[in-house]
Image (spheres, helix red, strand yellow):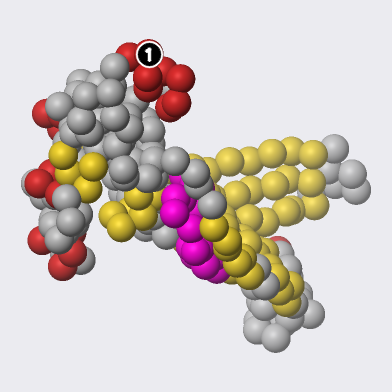
Amino acid sequence: MGVHGSSLAITPNRTVTRGMEWNYTWNQHDSKSYGFNGIPQLASLAYVYDLPVGLGRPFLNRPGVLNQIISGWKVSGIQQYQSGQPESIEDPPTDESLEEVGSGGYNTPDPIPGVPEKTAPKASGHSDPAVDFEFNEAAFKPACTFCFGTMSSTEATVRAFGYFDEDFSLLKDWRIHESWVLNFHIDAINAFNRVQFVQYQGQGGYDAEPSLNGPNAMGFSTLSDQPNPPRTLQLGMRLKW
């Protein structure tokens, strides 16, 4: 089965004042199969912002001890947002020699026409990853013996969950000697405590595809793992000389 098609990717980039940069990528595919990295939308934002307070700044423009405390602070951030990756549904090999040659030891099933691939909760946009299934198992059937399945190797009708992440830092440098600078920073990693879900027994949203009647069949299209760490707050100091 051949894989062919066309795609269009548009990525505008913009750098604005005060050290801020953003980019957004939009992909449009017209193909019979998607790559695992076929992500239609991706946006990222990275910036460093000097807070406008202290001597020579718009607010609290005064010398003295107060200036030493409040001036020179910066806020930095990295924010990333992307659509979910395409999924893959595996079918155990009907003949080991046949599939080993064609697809590295696994086959794809046959889709059943007219049966939706998304479950009702997934289609509604309000599925609960703790209890709901992502794929409708009734929409697929195993390929016949000595046959390759007619479904493409990756499926974009049902995608993995999107990826959302925000990391922020608050930092300041104090010059305590002609050549000595003390750096202080507070970091919030995964600041909004986002949860990234993966599939049964998976190390990633595209690493553990649902398998019809295979070793992962008991967990077909269920989610049971969080690969990203919870919110982390850390403080640090560094002396440069």
Which of the 4 image quadrants contains residue 148? top left
Rendered position, 173 above or below 74: above
Which of these two is toward me, 146 or 27? 146
Amino acid on which disc 1 is placed: Ser
Which of these two is toward me, 26 or 176? 26
What residue do we see at 67% from left, 78% from top? 52
Provide residue 238's location: percent of width, then percent of height: 69, 39
Which of the 4 image quadrants contains residue 240? top right
Q: Can residue 197 be seen in the rendering of this structure?
A: yes
- Side (left or right) of 226 relative to 204: left
What residue do we see at 15% from left, 61% from top? 114
Write down the residue under mark 1. Answer: 97
Q: Can residue 199 be seen in the rendering of this structure?
A: no
Instruction: Point out the stretch of residues depicted in magenta.
Output: 25-42
Which of these two is toward me, 147 or 88? 147
Q: Is residue 41 magenta?
A: yes
Provide residue 96's location: percent of width, then percent of height: 33, 14
Rendered position, 238 above or below 6: above
Which of these two is toward me, 24 or 185? 24
Q: What element carries label 1?
A: helix
